Image (cartoon, coloured by chain):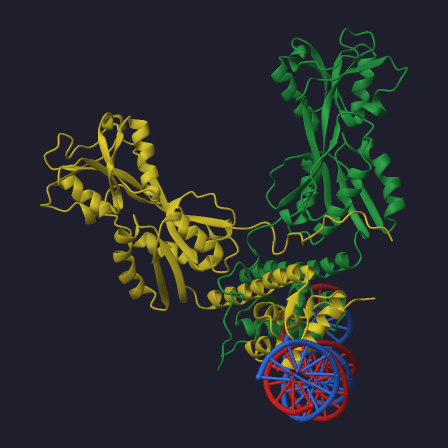
Chain colours: A yellow, B green, C blue, D red
DNA sequence: GTTGAGCCATAGCTTCAAGCTATCAGACTA
DNA sequence: TAGTCTGATAGCTTGAAGCTATGGCTCAAC
């Protein structure tokens, strides 16, 4: 007995064939000769004792079991890459490409501070930025197109871990001559009966602001939905209504001499938590913790109502299953077939 | 450049060292010489560029990164085992050891039919049985001590997939001379004001029966909690009260001449669904589907109120992530990359 | 302080698995 | 029917990974 186990080279060969459906091209992409690849696949089939690939000279197909094994083989090879990646990031912390997605109600207020600071303190880190709404970011995160997402927590996305960065209060923006202008310690109920200008559908901050409206008994002025906070704030300046913005946006959006004023709420003020999200399987948790620290260090602390939070040790983020495989193959309605 | 990737042998070596904290014994357990193992670990550290193991002649410790890499290496090797297992079960369906856990309110009524039938029709399958309550079974399932659990659905356990087998109505058991004896089409509300005998804490059927009590306005006779359905039914025979049992238990527990009678409820009667649970990563989904078919085939169909259900194709059980690596890169369909 | 035991690392040899080139055999096309 | 494309096979070559032998270190016992 003592069946030999599949080799990594064999798994790579199989995955290559699955990707290209062509032995010659698969061999080229793996930088081996075609006979080598051919015999690797054959050897894998021999050690597993089952046929994985149906070959004719005209086409290459995978058997159903073959498909399933390809899926698992991808998992194995990916996990191996992760090990290498983990070592790299342990060796050279916070270096290399970091594909970071940021939601639109955070990006314009955080990035102008973060980017120069990071370039100065961590020149080896190269941020690849992408701005999109939460659902798109989480999608890309899970699919592997992003390494990290900077968004509002919590999201309760399976397979995604979160690292809190800061809380920011919601601040009321009014025209300068509004009765509430400059107020502080407002009860949320003071919004009762007001009409608020909100963001378009899809922005998570819209949903958060709507929650406040519901609690306060305010309504949305739904004929005027803004594509960005900037737009909305300009509408406020134009006297079209009031709005809420997250505290970190105040410095940029509500400057002097624009005919705008703010008002803050009584504690506990409505607020949201902003943080980083990443795959639980990510090999770079240590990096993400470092980056989180960098981000916290660049927060506009002069801005009241922005409160750094967290810094739970990286080890707190743990998955409990090795995962990988799973899944049935196909076509198993087969009745009890007797021998 | 072109860093070599870790080898499977290197990963096995590292895991062995982590397990034994001793190079010599680890080498023995892997059936290689100590120098071989030593150089394998050294080679792994060289390719990863980081120290994984702290050796003195007196003790062997893992560095923190080493611990994490061991964890991932275990995942890789486990996934590889799963691939082999998948092949075995594709080659020889439903053979080998099957570690099956069963809840106490199902085991005595299903197993006496299942075991002989399975021995006759699938002599190659060896069931290793364990009887325990749901929470213990799920625990062992996730930990890998069980392959399968037969219990009430749904459980909503992350990482655990479920395969429905049958629904069974709850049946009222009364003394033979009780006014409700022999009744059928009872509304659940007919239990209003009655006192029911129930199982001890921890049995899922206790919770299910309590739900019925709540709906019907009945109470539990909490001074008398039974350790098993048999005990409770005997208490009913002794005139101590009424109880509910799942339909599959009726044939065994409520025979002729024991001074007992049953009454059934009006449709939709209170019922529960029984099914199989297994890790989503299980390599033997095809086997579990076959076994499910075997179980359905041995159901007491003569018993009214037991209804086979399901047989959703195994392909219905799918996770949407490759997991493990999930990694950004990992065999993403790179187009034929030429030099 | 010396010596022996236990442990991991190193050196050097050996071997076989995995790679390569060259070629074959089948299938479709022109 | 000849040509072209495909994957499989044959036979050679090589280096990675295994082994034995040995070295060097640390600790404990006397």
Q: As drawn, is B136 to the left or to the right of A27?
A: right
Q: As drawn, is A266 to the left or to the right of A99?
A: left
Residue A328 seen in the current view: yes
What is the quadrant of residue B198 in the picture? top right
Q: How many marks?
A: 0
Percent position of residue B267, x then y = 67, 20
Q: A262 or A232: which is nearer to us?
A: A232
Q: A199 or A190: which is nearer to us?
A: A199
Rendered position, B15 above or below A186: below
Name the residue: 56% across, 62% down. Answer: B63
Q: A92 or A127: which is nearer to us?
A: A127
Name the residue: 84% across, 24% down. Answer: B251
Rendered position, A28 above or below A208: below
Percent position of residue A178, x then y = 12, 32
Rendered position, B30 above or below B250: below
Q: As drawn, is A283 to the left or to the right of B91?
A: left
What is the quadrant of residue B306 in the picture? top right
Q: As drawn, is A52 to the left or to the right of B109?
A: left
Residue A268 seen in the current view: no
Percent position of residue C23, x then y = 71, 91
Percent position of residue A142, x then y = 48, 54
Q: B296 or B26: which is nearer to us?
A: B296
């Amino acid at each position: 007995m003592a069946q030999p186990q599949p080799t990594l080279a064999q798994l790579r060969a199989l995955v290559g064939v699955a990707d290209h459906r062509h032995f010659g091209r698969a061999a080229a992409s793996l930088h081996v000769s075609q006979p080598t690849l051919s015999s690797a696949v054959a050897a894998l089939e021999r050690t597993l004792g089952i046929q994985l690939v149906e070959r004719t000279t005209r086409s290459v197909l995978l058997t159903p079991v073959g498909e399933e094994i390809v899926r698992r083989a991808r998992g194995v090879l990916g996990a191996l890459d992760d090990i290498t990646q983990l070592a790299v990031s342990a060796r050279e912390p916070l270096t290399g490409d970091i594909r970071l997605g940021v939601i639109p109600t955070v990006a314009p207020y955080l990035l102008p501070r973060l980017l120069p600071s990071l370039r100065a303190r961590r020149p080896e880190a190269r941020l690849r930025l992408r701005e999109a709404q939460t659902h798109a970011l989480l999608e890309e995160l899970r699919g592997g197109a992003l390494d990290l997402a900077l968004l509002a927590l919590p999201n309760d996305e399976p397979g995604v871990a979160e690292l809190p960065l800061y809380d920011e209060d919601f601040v009321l923006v009014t025209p300068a001559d509004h009765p509430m202008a400059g107020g502080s310690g407002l009860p949320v109920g003071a919004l009762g009966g007001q009409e608020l200008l909100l963001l378009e559908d899809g922005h998570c901050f819209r949903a958060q602001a709507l929650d406040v409206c519901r609690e306060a008994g305010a309504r949305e002025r739904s004929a005027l939905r803004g594509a960005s906070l900037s737009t909305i704030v300009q509408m406020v300046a134009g006297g079209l209504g009031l709005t809420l913005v997250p505290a970190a946006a105040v410095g940029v959006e509500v400057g002097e001499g624009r005919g705008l004023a703010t008002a803050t709420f009584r504690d506990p003020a409505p607020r949201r938590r902003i943080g980083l999200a990443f795959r639980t399987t990510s090999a770079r948790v240590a990096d993400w913790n470092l980056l989180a620290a960098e981000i916290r260090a660049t927060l506009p602390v002069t801005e009241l109502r922005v409160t750094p939070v967290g810094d739970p040790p990286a080890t707190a983020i743990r998955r409990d299953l090795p995962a990988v495989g799973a899944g049935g193959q196909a076509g198993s309605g087969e009745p009890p077939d007797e021998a």
